[in-house]
Every structure is written in structure tokens, then in C-alpha cells.
Image (cartoon, grey):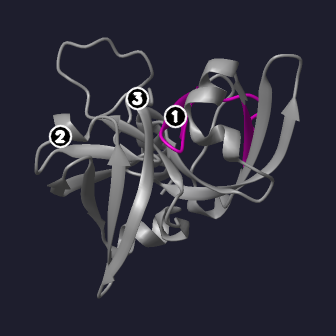
Amino acid sequence: MFTGIVETFGKVTDLQYEKENLHLTVQSDFTSQLKIDQSVAHNGVCLTVVAINNNEYTVTAIKETLEKTNLNTLQVGDLVNLERGMKVGDRLDGHIVQGHVDQTANCISITETNGSWEFTFEYDASLHNVTIEKGSITVNGVSLTVVNSKSNQFSVCIIPYTYKHTNFKYFEVGTVINLEFDVIGKYVSRLAELGLK
């Protein structure tokens, strides 16, 4: 379980395919605090630490994860948003994030607005995921509030601190990002769908 409050960047240092799996090696400031079997969110994707070597660690993404996320677009040198699992008793400063990405989206607009940035994303609405105005959304592992909600797109506003400390500052129009929709909203949507049958 995560909160969507990114702790630090990780730098991808190696990518190795083994059959349909991808082993990602990441250099991180908190590697020395990790242990084997620990969960870490990478751009919002929960992955298990399988190896540690000095200041680098390795995680493995399976085929389904690669198909549903932007991890298959990573290259050596890319920076990913990192968050370790939430500790029981900690404050929930973001919202409940499972680390289970629902789908990807494309950045279609970036507007700088006198001290902040508005990013607009478009996603495939046929997967029946929804956003609501002022609801929660996780973009590349970052807990954010939705503005301008539409059936297949939404915007978020980014303050300077978030811009500086996440990989939002590297986004361009066309950048593919990971989305995790609000878990409560997903259950409500599913229950409504079942009630209509």
C-alpha cells in the first residue's frame, strides 16, 4: 500500500529481458535501506526487490505489467518516481494507492500558469475507468486532484515543489504515463455496472 507521495527519483541503470519478464536495475538514494522482498512503487507500479548491489537494486516486471504500464518504454538513464510502502501508523498525506496501474494515458497539453503547471491527459475510456472533479488520481505514482474531468481525459495542476521533485518536469506532449484510478471509485463503478444487469 502506498500514498502517492513520491520520496525520490530512481535512475534506471540496466534493463534485461528474460523471456517475457523485464529485470529493471535502479540506482536510488534509499537502496541501503531496502531489503529483498520489499515492495517499491516505480512510476506508480508496485514491484518486488529481488536483488541489491551497493546503491543499486533490481526488480522484475512480468508481461501483464509491461502491457498495462509505461515500464516497457524505459531506457537506461531514465528517472522514475519512487515510493516505498506505507508504514502502519503513518499519516496518509496523499490517498490510498495500491501500486496497481489500471492503464496508461498520453499527455496532450502542458500549460504554465503563473507559478504552476496544468497537465492534461487523454486515456482509453473503453476500459470504463472514470475520474470525477476534485477526485483523486495517481499519475506516475503521484497522488493528485482531478480538474476538468471528461469522459476520456482530465487535467491536474502541479505546484513547483511537485514539479521539481517528480518526473513531471520531463513530461512533453505525447509522453506516456501510468494511471491508477481511485480504488473507491473503481468499486462504486463496478457495483453500478453490476446493478444495471
Residue 143 colored in magenta in the image = yes
Residue at mark 1: 142
Element on which disc 1 rests: strand
- Residue plotted at (31% across, 72% down): 62
The x, y position of residue 80, in whole percent, is: 48, 48
Q: Residue type at mark 2: give it.
A: Leu
Residue 191 in percent (x, y) is at 42, 44
Q: Which residues are magenta?
A: 135-156
Q: Is residue 68 left or right of residue 30?
A: right
In which quadrant is the N terminus drawn?
top left
Residue 170, image x, y percentages: 68, 46
Depth check, front residue: 15 or 150: 15
Q: Is residue 182 left or right of residue 157?
A: left
The magenta stretch spans residue 136: yes
Could you tell me the amino acid type at mark 3?
Glu
| Contact between labelled residues 3 and 1, with CB atoms less than 8 Å apart | no
